[in-house]
């Protein structure tokens, strides 16, 4: 399961509404793809449909879908939002990552 912090929840809901999505019926699609300076990078986007092989769950009022392959890399991850001096954006706190890059957008196992 992927957890969503309170700050990330507020930002997700705000961005979904800005882009014409409904936070109560639509999803945040979280995935992993090859690339980034550490080997794998996170992929985050809004979606309004889940495929048969997707894992679907909800945390802190945010509906999340993850494809089966990505789910193996993301189990136990917390989606957070940082608005500090080092940059603004979503941050993945992934306990499965053995190494992350300085920007926090990629990782390796």
Image (cartoon, rainbow, N blue to C red):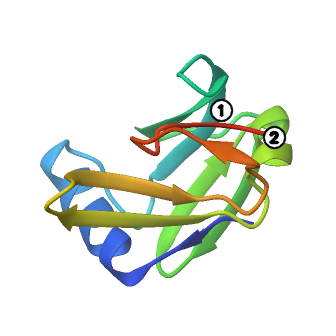
* In the depicted structure, whether residue 74 falls above or below residue 12: above
- The residue that mark 1 highlights is 32
**Residue drawn at (47%, 41%) of the image:** 48
Structural crowding at the residue carrying mark 2, measured as other residues with C-alpha within 10 Å and reported as few (<14), some (14–19) or many (≥20): few
Left or right, 35 with reference to 10: right
**Vertical arrangement, residue 10 with respect to residue 49, above or below:** below
Q: Position of residue 62 (x, y in %)?
A: 47, 69
Provide residue 51's location: percent of width, then percent of height. Answer: 72, 34
Q: Secondary structure at mark 1?
A: strand
Quarter holding residue 11: bottom left
Q: Is residue 21 above or below residue 1?
A: above
* In this picture, residue 35 sits left or right of residue 66: left
Quadrant location of the C terminus in the rendered image:
top right
The percent position of residue 52, horizontal first and vertical second, equals 81, 36
Q: Nearer the viewer, mark 2 or mark 1?
A: 2
Q: Within the image, what quadrant is residue 31 found in?
A: top right
Q: List the residue tagged with mark 2.
A: 109
Quadrant location, the N terminus: bottom right
């Amino acid at each position: 399961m992927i957890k969503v912090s309170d700050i990330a929840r507020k930002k997700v809901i705000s961005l979904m509404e800005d882009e014409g999505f409904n936070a109560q019926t639509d999803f945040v699609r979280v995935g992993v793809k090859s690339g980034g300076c550490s080997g794998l990078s996170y992929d985050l986007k809004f979606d309004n449909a889940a495929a048969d092989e997707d894992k679907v769950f909800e945390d802190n009022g945010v509906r999340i879908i993850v494809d089966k392959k990505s789910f193996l890399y993301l189990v136990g991850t917390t989606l957070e939002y940082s608005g500090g001096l080092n940059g603004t954006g979503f941050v993945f706190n992934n306990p499965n990552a053995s190494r992350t890059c300085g920007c926090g957008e990629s990782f390796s196992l």
